[in-house]
Amino acid sequence: MTLLQSIILGIVQGLTEFLPISSSAHLVLVPHLLGWKIPAEEAFVFDVLVQVATIVAVFAYYWKDVKDILVGMWSALQQRELLANPQARLGWNIVVASIPAGILGLMLRDAVEAAFNSPTVTAVFLLGTAALLLFAERFGRQNLPIDRLTWIDAMFIGFYQAIAIFPGISRSGSTIAGGMARNLSRAEAARFAFLMSMPIMLAAGLLAATDLIGLPNLGSLLPVFIPGFIASAVTGYLSVRWLLGYLVQHSLAVFAIYCAALALLVLALNFFR
């Protein structure tokens, strides 16, 4: 991987991690469409690391929410009543929602790594993202406040996040769709999706760190990876800020159309090649 490729892919990750169009799909398809030959082991570790960079973006945007949630959970523990306040309930729901993706990610790690090497499989999963977004818009009632979520709702949304371990299934798109399927508004579903992404993305980053340490050319790769990490964090913050404002008054249909169009383009190109 070159320095220019790292920066471009970092920007791609930051822009697409929070937009419901699958950052993982773009990290697979952009090199494929541009003809970049990046070693699979390097690509997978880089992809996870720039996803961790977007945690920095989420924390920067939601730092007050994170602080309030942690304080609320600590206060509830001191009172020996886990659901003593709304912030504690939100915090424990985030924990519950993180469980399915964590389990599935560990069980299917090898299959996920293989999928990252297949543009065709990625394109098919991208069609799945389009279907999830349209389903949410069609059937979500969008009338449930976020502080009324139950642990069952959280687990349900967590399963939507779990399927996003595969490239092409947008994490933000699937979890926003899951929240809307439990009747959260678009904006509230996005807020919960972004907050619940932090634990699972951090865990994935720590897991990738073990792969990174094992790379024989680590010393030469770090100067290449770090600029991509920074580019991902900065563009991720801007992406979160824009999307939350957009979802207040606009539907997810435009993102579904984009996902379907990109998937069909890749499938067509692969067919004619």
Image: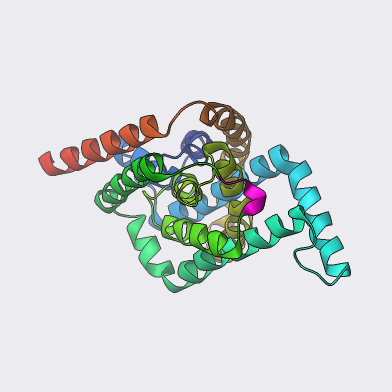
Image position of 73 (left or right of 269): right
For the point 50% across and 40% down, which residue is it? 13
Image position of 178 (left or right of 122): right
Q: Where is residue 10 in the image (x, y as percent from the top left)?
A: 52, 38
Q: Position of residue 144 (x, y in %)?
A: 57, 46
Q: Residue 79 occupies which quadrant of the picture?
A: bottom right
Q: Main secondary structure of the magenta part?
A: helix
147 within the magenta span: yes
Image position of 249 (left or right of 255): right
Of residues 105 and 78, the one drawn nearer to the viewer in this rendering: 78
For the point 63% across and 34% down, which residue is it? 237
Q: Quadrant of the N terminus?
A: top left
Q: What stretch is highlighted in magenta?
A: 144-148
User: As displayed, is residue 273 above or below residue 220?
Assistant: above
Q: Where is residue 263 in the image (x, y as percent from the top left)?
A: 27, 40
For the point 60% across and 44% down, which residue is it? 54
User: As displayed, is residue 166 above or below residue 142?
Assistant: below
**Residue 212 visible, this orientation:** no
198 within the magenta span: no
For the point 62% across and 39% down, which residue is it? 233
Snapshot colouring:
rainbow
Of residues 216 and 232, the one drawn nearer to the viewer in this rendering: 232
